[in-house]
Amino acid sequence: MSFVSVRDLKVAFDGVQVLHGINLDVRRGEAVGLVGESGCGKSVTWLAALGLLPGKAKVSGSVTVDGQELIGASPRRIEAVRGAKIAMIFQDPSSALNPVHRVGRQICENLRLHRGLRGDAARTEAIRLMDIVGIPSANTRFDLYPHEFSGGQCQRVLIAMALAGAPDLLIADEPTTALDATIQAQILDLLSNLRRQTGMAMVFISHDLGAVSTVCDRAAVMYAGRIIEANDIKQLFAAPRHPYTRGLFDAIPDLDAGRARLSLIPGTVPDPKRLPQGCAFAPRCARAGDLCREYQPELKEQTSTGLTACFHPIPIGSANRQEVFA
Amino acid sequence: MSTLLQAKGLIQQYRTAKTFLGKTSTMRAVDGIDLTVREGEILGIVGESGSGKSTLGRLLLGLEPPFAGEILYRGHPMPEPRTPAWRRLRAEMQLIFQDPLSALDRRLTVSAQIGEPLEIHGLAAAGSERDERVAELIAKVGLRQDQAGSYPHELSGGQRQRVVIARALASNPRFLVCDEPVSALDVSIQAQVVNLLRDLQDREGLTMVFISHDLKVVRNICDRVAVMYLGRIVEEASSDAIFSDPRHPYTRALVSSVPKIGAGLHGRIILQGEPPNPAARPSGCAFHPRCRFADADCAATIPELELHDGRLAACRKLRHTLRSAA
Ligand SMILES: Nc1ncnc2c1ncn2[C@@H]1O[C@H](COP(=O)(O)OP(=O)(O)O)[C@@H](O)[C@H]1O
Ligand SMILES: Nc1ncnc2c1ncn2[C@@H]1O[C@H](COP(=O)(O)OP(=O)(O)O)[C@@H](O)[C@H]1O
Ligand SMILES: [Mg+2]
Ligand SMILES: [Mg+2]
């Protein structure tokens, strides 16, 4: 059974629907990527699932964690489930820390909340966590303030705080986006090591397909508030079936390729207030037909493992883009 | 190819912010750079944040005078800022930077933004001549003529960057410095703008310095690449050579840190230590504290950018032990 199960999750802000029925499962111990361009609903999906959206958000559907329903549950109950089992880290590590409190104290606070540790026991454990996440001389840096840490180290502190609750699931929302390349590599390495050591599951949200492919077992691609393709990492990247997924892959320059012109997806992501009829990608899609402009394709099984929401998925084995869009 | 611009011994230093003891000191953002920009090429400048890329870009454009060193543009020294000669050069050299919204005046329509430089540089009389020229620029950057009356907030990020580019092109520049021009854009839009810049460079024979921390984009667009670390160039070569056969240990780590789709984390060089801080520059080779090949020599002497096996790199270790990347 899935550890987290999201069913038909919908979210609207001020009457504008931004999530249109998300179905997603996270099993114990696995790493699931969520990719897509900005505004497609990656963050809102998890904020809604964990009851973290502002009150004006209208949320419906079902989210269960270990079999317990969160949608419609009391804030206290959600907090109890979330606090015990799920931790989140975000893109901007420095703003997620309290600037006026010492870093060590902030980790201790989480240890008190989640594990009831206080005093010396908390301090010892906090220093152990700082060590684990790779903060050098943790002992002496325990009493420093967040501004005395670099961006990469702040992200490490947040990861230490997340680990304080020994979570079953870590949701990492663009955790490396604000970091420099070599520091990004360090954090990705740290996250996969931690996952190996603790066996926790991870949801890795990112617009960086390369990063997702290196740390996840499988991934879901979102477009305009829907999941349009999901598969295990190898198959997804080797043989994307949805024309948007394919277009996205082709638009990323390849470090090993030369100076060839980039292939691109024409147009832009639609405004959630003005979604086109039918498939939201149809106006930008070279494969779209009348059906696509009329009806919304369901996310359906296309191969043994993969799901695609497309009436005209790309045939398996089409080698290059020219062929695909011929 | 003839030389368009030559920088010799460039140094730029700034005062650091006051510490809590009220002390200030100086730090070098650019610390001894010799660089040649050839007519018609796209030269990439890569490096992590704080390495001095933007400062170098402003120096190359003569937007601020260097603390030491000189810049020759078409063989002539850069005129003093805000002199008539300097103003004449502004039309010929343009800067495009990351955040299009802050580069645009939110009270002006697209056509007014694009027409403004024509007026400032006295390039087209108000009325039909200017309107024609604006329409031409709108077409050149791939905007629609019906967007001429739109305001910046009514446009998407990619469209705004097109307005910025059109505005920069209005004065018929020969030299463009693009500072992270696509970093704020989504993948599919990034590809559109990268292709636009390439086409413009091709068609108009522009010379470009393209600054970016995104190595994949630099790989795609640049002919030649200079790699910066703490205010100095540590390696310089053709784009092909830098990415397929990096020599300097920092370049190797940087190239290796780019997550490759399907490659996993295996075999990546994970640098230890923190990103460089120009306010606390290590002695000798600034990279030595993070370098796995460094020895006492590296901590003592600053290596010059010189030829090793026909390749320009600033590393003492390249003399003996290191050959091409294994
Ligand atoms: N608090 C909010 N109020 C109103 N709209 C919101 C709010 N949060 C997100 N949205 C909208 O929901 C959509 C999805 O946003 P988000 O999930 O943040 O995208 P991303 O995929 O970039 O994480 C966007 O159109 C965004 O503008
Ligand atoms: N005008 C300025 N005044 C003071 N410090 C500056 C100024 N411009 C840049 N710096 C500092 O110089 C260093 C290099 O900055 P920058 O050239 O912006 O690097 P990059 O573009 O590679 O990130 C940074 O430490 C930055 O804080
Ligand atoms: Mg987000
Ligand atoms: Mg910069």
Image (cartoon, coloured by chain):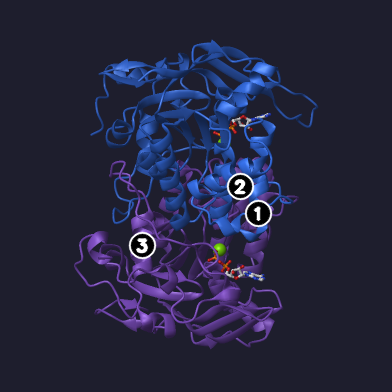
Could you tell me the amino acid type at mark 1? Pro
Q: Quadrant of the N terminus of chain B?
A: top left
- Chain coloured purple in this rendering: A
Does residue B184 sit above or below A206 in this rendering?
above
Residue A58: x, y in percent? 65, 82
Q: Which residue is mark 1?
A: B152
Q: Quadrant of the C terminus of chain B?
A: top left
Q: Residues within 10 Å of mark 2 (few under 14, many from 20)?
A: many
B108 or B321, nearer to the observer: B108
Q: Nearer the viewer, mark 1 or mark 2?
A: 1
Identity of the residue drawn at 49% across and 23% down: B232
Q: Which residue is mark 3?
A: A247
Q: Given contact means CB atoms under 8 Å apart, are the residues at marks 1 and 3 in contact?
A: no
Chain ID at mark 1 = B
Identity of the residue drawn at 58% across and 56% down: A158
- Chain coloured blue in this rendering: B
Q: Given contact means CB atoms under 8 Å apart, are the residues at marks 1 and 2 in contact?
A: yes
Chain-order first, disc 1 or disc 2: 2
Q: Considering the numbered disc 1 on the image, is that residue within a helix, a strand or a loop?
A: helix
Q: What distance separates the C-alpha of mark 1 from that of mark 2?
A: 9 Å
Identity of the residue drawn at 34% across and 68% down: A286
